[in-house]
Amino acid sequence: MNCEQHHQNLDRFLDDELENALLHQFQAHTTDCDNCAAALRRKSRLRQALKSMPILPPEDGFLDSVVEQTLVKTHRNEVRFWSTAGIGGAIAAGVIAWLIVSLPAELPSVVEQDSLDTVTISLNVEKTFKLTFESSRDMQDATLSLKLPAGVEVPGFEGLDTVAWTTAIEKGSNILEMPIIVRSGDGGTILARLEHEGKQKSFLFAVTVT
Amino acid sequence: MRKGSSNQQQSFTALIKPHLERLYRLAFRLTGQREDAQDLVQDVLLKLYSQLDRLAEVDAVVTWLSRVVYHQFVDNQRRYASHRLHVVGDPKFSRDPDLAVALQTSTEDLAEGEFTQERLQTALNQLSDDHRLIINLHDVEGYTLAEVAEITGISLGTLKSRRQRARERLQKLLEKGPE
């Protein structure tokens, strides 16, 4: 076995997939060739490092409570809506507002206020509201942005007064769960804007602090 | 079996609890985020409850449960594709901030620092979804190729060639450094 053949069989050796004859040749070459022996050690360390990749444990109590939660939810035959990936922060206990926005086949080219609803929230208490987009067609690479008043934050994106995502809106109902938290002040108005292919749709809702 | 009797609930709890940690691990490898992994596990349990009779009869429970997790993950990705949001212009939010902390501290444990876990995670994040899946399930979590085939429904031959390409790509990314 030469160095190239040794290199080609590194993974098969580490996977225990080499047949006896080839295995002996591989081992003999490893003994004779310092470079190939080093390559094998390096590959082996990589495998070991992969096996040691850390995992972020679940939140305290999650594994104990998730079955119970399942039984409760199933018993109540509740409809469950799923959180958005990457939005940051746990889903808060209460849904405090449903904002339903119907998107026309073509988004208007000017900003208009579609709905103004009020979300009531306590200071420093995370709450989740849901935005439902009813779209008449698929929209790839749409941009959804939230412009937040002073003191209002999206958990996970602290310190940002504007948070924006690229997303795809599917034909039909699209539900976005959005946690917010008021850190200071008495709330204000949140401007949510959806932009797609140069057109945009905006809507406002008020956040008041109890 | 939508509304469970006490016996059903006890059976479900007894059957599922020993596997919860493993389910979470797989969910975390698939999603890369704690919150999403927890959501996925919750999603799977809700589905499994309606399949309690089937769950009780399965021989290879871990593989079967893993398959349910994987397919739920794929379904969620398709169904909620519009909700898989990415922060515009700020890639630092694309990774769980708590995980980043864990990775930074764990690198100190590596003797040579050649394959620090942070470097590895960065390289893994740069792989395609298919390549990351096979590396995560097979090389990281230790599922055999046959189990991965059972879980994903992908043929063994495809998985073998995909595994090889994924490893080569990972090696190149590690040699090249972060993009």
Image (tube, helix red, strand yellow):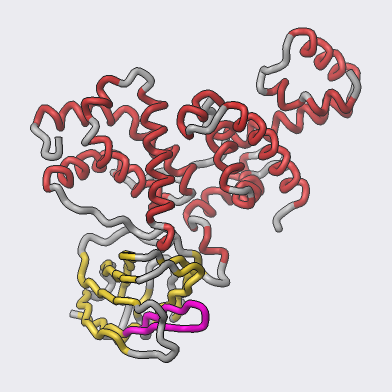
Residue range (magenta): A191-203
Q: Is residue A199 above or below residue B163?
A: below
Q: Main secondary structure of the magenta part?
A: strand
Query: Would residue A89 appear left or right of A164 to someone viewing this image?
Result: left
Q: Position of residue A157 (x, y in %)?
A: 44, 70
Q: Position of residue A66 (x, y in %)?
A: 26, 42
Q: Nearer the viewer, residue B88 or A91?
A: B88
Query: Would residue B112 appear left or right of B141 to someone viewing this image?
Result: right
Query: Would residue B98 appear left or right of A73 to someone viewing this image?
Result: right
For the point 12% across and 48% down, the residue is A76
User: Quarter of the image holding residue A81?
Assistant: bottom left
Quadrant of the snapshot with the C terminus of chain B: bottom right
Q: Position of residue A167 (x, y in %)?
A: 46, 67
How many marks the image carries: the answer is 0
For the point 27% across and 35% down, the residue is B48
For the point 48% across and 77% down, the residue is A196
Residue B113 appears anywhere in the view = no
Q: Nearer the viewer, residue A32 or A136?
A: A136
Q: Is residue A134 above or below residue A55?
A: below
Quadrant of the snapshot with the N terminus of chain B: top left
Residue A118 among those drawn in magenta: no
Residue A199 among those drawn in magenta: yes
Q: Nearer the viewer, residue A19 or B174?
A: A19
Query: Would residue A111 appear left or right of B89 to someone viewing this image?
Result: left
